[in-house]
Image (cartoon, rainbow, N blue to C red):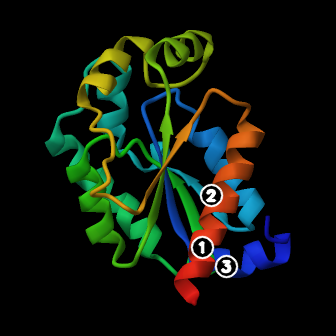
Amino acid sequence: MATAQSEQGVATRLAIIVMGVSGSGKSSVGEGLAAALGIDFVDGDGLHSPENVAKMASGTPLADDDRWPWLDRIGATLADRAAHPAGIVVACSALRKIYRDRIRNAAGQPIRFVFLDAPQSLVQDRLGARKGHFMPPSLLASQYATLERPTAGEPDVLPVAVDVPVAEIVRGAAARLTADAAKALN
């Protein structure tokens, strides 16, 4: 693995989305990845409108019309080099390809996605234990129904299994992203 300093040097060129269903570990992995790369972390949940938060908290899944402005805010956050000059990691579900494409277009720069591939049974257990989050466990089935797993047609997506500890996920993803960014520079 690259040294921390070289990881930070390469990371200045990275804009990363940690994606997956609610409860897959986006915030934990995103925070860890940002710390490992020495860049900022933003939780995309904080970019939802109050109306979206209220809708989800009531157990109603979001419609695409609810999501578009949120996805545009995610992309704008990735694009804001003044606020995040060293790079950024954003946690965002990005469940469908059209959502990922919307973020890619709004970001206006190359980005990488880290897809947290989690079995529904594992996530159901996590959501049952989670306290104080607006997303109720009752919406998990709708998240999996909406999920379009990234395919080979999306080479900017790094799939990661989440059946190992968060620290191991972070180490593996940081090493891969750093190596890929270094290759792109050569």
What residue do we see at 74% from left, 51% from top?
Answer: 171
Report x, y in % for residue 8. Answer: 74, 75
Q: Position of residue 136 (x, y in %)?
A: 43, 16
Q: Could you say which disc has been placed on residue 41 in the image?
A: 2
The 10 Å Cα crowd at callout 1, few under 14, some 14 to 19, many 20 or more, is many
**Could you tell me which residue is drawn at 52 percent across and 55 percent down?**
90
* Residue displayed at 68% across by 68% down: 39
Q: Earlier in the sequence, mark 1 or mark 2?
A: 2
- The answer to whether residue 162 is seen in the rendering is yes
Q: Secondary structure at mark 2?
A: strand
Q: Position of residue 153 (x, y in %)?
A: 27, 57
Say if 111 sits above or below 33 in the image.
Answer: below
Viewer-side label of 1, 3: 3
In this rendering, the count of numbered labels is 3
Mark 2 neighbour class, 10 Å CA radius: few under 14, some 14 to 19, many 20 or more:
many
Which mark, residue 112? none
Tags 1 and 3 touching, CB below 8 Å: no
Give the image location of residue 142, x and y in percent. Answer: 27, 21
Query: What distance separates the C-alpha of mark 1 from that of mark 3?
Result: 9 Å
In the picture, the disc for residue 10 is 3
Amino acid type indicated by mark 3:
Val
Kind of residue sitting beneath label 1: Gly
Q: Is residue 27 left or right of residue 36?
A: left
The amino acid pointed to by label 2 is: Phe
Look at the numbered disc 1 and give the secondary structure of its residue: loop
Marks 2, 3: nearer the viewer: 3
Q: Nearer the viewer, residue 97 or 184?
A: 184
Compare marks 2 and 3 and give the one earlier in the sequence. Answer: 3
Residue labelled with disc 1: 87
- Tell me what residue is drawn at x 51 percent, y 39 percent: 116
Q: Is residue 84 in view from this perspective?
A: no
